[in-house]
Image: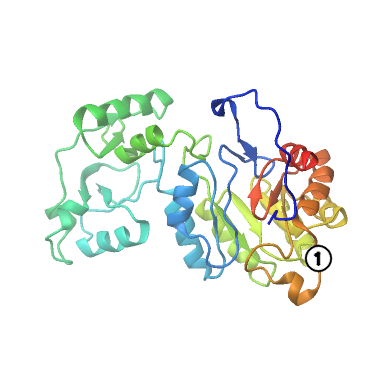
Amino acid sequence: AYDDIISLPGYIDFLLSDINLSSQISKNIKLKLPIVSSPMDTVTESQMAIYMALLGGIGIIHANNTTEEQVKEVMKVKRYSNGIIEEPVIFNPEQTVADVRRAIEYYGFSGFPITIDGKVNSKLLGMVSGRDIDFAEDEELLKNIMTTELITLNSSGSSSTLREGQEIIKKNKINRLPLVDDDYNLISLICKKDVKNKKNYPNATRHNETLQLMVGAAISTHPGYKERSDELVKAGVDLLVLDSSQGNSIFQVEAIEYLKNKYPQIDIIGGNVVTVDQAKVLIDAGVDGLRVGMGIGSICTTQEVCGVGRPQATSVFKVAEYSRHFKVPVIADGGISNTGHITKALSLG
C-alpha cells in the first residue's frame, strides 16, 4: 500500500525494548500491538479473532454470513478467555450427553457445571467435561456421569477471590474451579485456561472489567443492520465497523447516528474515506474511528471499477492531520497507528 513512498534512514539512539507500539483503534479502545484485521467478507472468524486479541491486536468478524452465524463467532471469542466467569454455561442433572455435545460444538469448550435447575445461583451438584462423555451414549442423563467430588471456593466476587482461585487451580492441578456461596449455590467459575492465557499473553487486548478478549464485528448500512447490531451487542461485541468502500454517504451517517444514540457504550468505526471532507462528515455524525483507503491493496478494485480513490500515503496523512484535532483515530488499510504516529511517520517520508 505504500510502494510510492520511502523514508530516509535516520540516527538511532534507542533500544528495541524502548519502542511502544500501543495505539488507539477508536476513542475508547487501545491496542498494544497496532494490528487489526479487515472487516471485509470471509477474512476473520472466531479462531483468527481470538489469536489476534491474545497477541495484542483485534479481529473484526465479517458480515458475509447470517446474523446468527456472526453472533456465534463473536460469542466464541468472548467466552474464550475470562477472569471470573459470571455467566457460565450450566446444565441440570436431567439433561443428556447429547445436550453437552451440542454445547461443546457451539461454544468450543468442554467443561460445564451442573446445578439443580441449570441456572446460576442454584445448588451446585457436579461438573461434566468432555472426558466424562467420551464413551457415553447420547441419551445418558448427566446425573449418572457427572463428577460430584469437587474442589470449590467460597466467593465474594472480588479481585482477591480471583487471585485465591488461581492459586487453588495451580495447587490442585484442576481445570475448573466453581465459586459458591455459603449455601453451596453456584456463583461463578474460574478456568485454568484463563490463568495460563493471562501468563502466556500479557499483551492481550482484554476488557478492563471482565478480562474477556475484545472483538469487533462488521456491519453494513443495508436493511437489517439494526437488528444485526442488536444481536451483536447482546453477544458482547466491543466494536462495530461499518464496512463500505465509500463511507461518505447519507446511509452511513444515518447508521452512525442511530448506533451512537442507541449504544453509546459501543465504539463505531466508519469509512472508508480518503479526504478531509469525507472524514468531517463522519466525525460530525459521531464516529469513534475512521478507516482510510480506497483502491489500495491487492484485491480492492474501487479505483479500477469506479475511477475514484487516492494514493494511500496522502490519504492517511491528510485524514490523520484533520482527525487528530477531534481525537478520532485513523485505521489505515495496510497498517494501523494512532494519528500522531502516522503524521510524524509520513512527514518524515
Q: Nearer the viewer, residue 99 or 130?
A: 130
Q: Nearer the viewer, residue 16 or 84?
A: 16
Residue 195, image quadrant = top left
Residue positioned 16% across, 67% down in the render: 139
Q: Which residue is mark 1?
A: 249
Residue positioned 64% across, 48% down in the render: 266
Residue 219, image quadrant = bottom right
Residue 288, x across and y down, in percent: 72, 47
Near mark 1 (Cα within 10 A), the count class, few <14, some 14-19 or many ≥20, is: some
Q: Is residue 182 visible?
A: no
Residue 117, x across and y down, in percent: 29, 51
Question: In the rendered view of the protein, which quadrant contains the N terminus?
Answer: bottom right
Residue 11, x across and y down, in percent: 69, 28
Residue 225, image quadrant = bottom right
What amino acid type should be assigned to the residue bearing mark 1? Ser
Residue positioned 45% across, 57% down in the render: 46
Residue 137, x across and y down, in percent: 13, 65
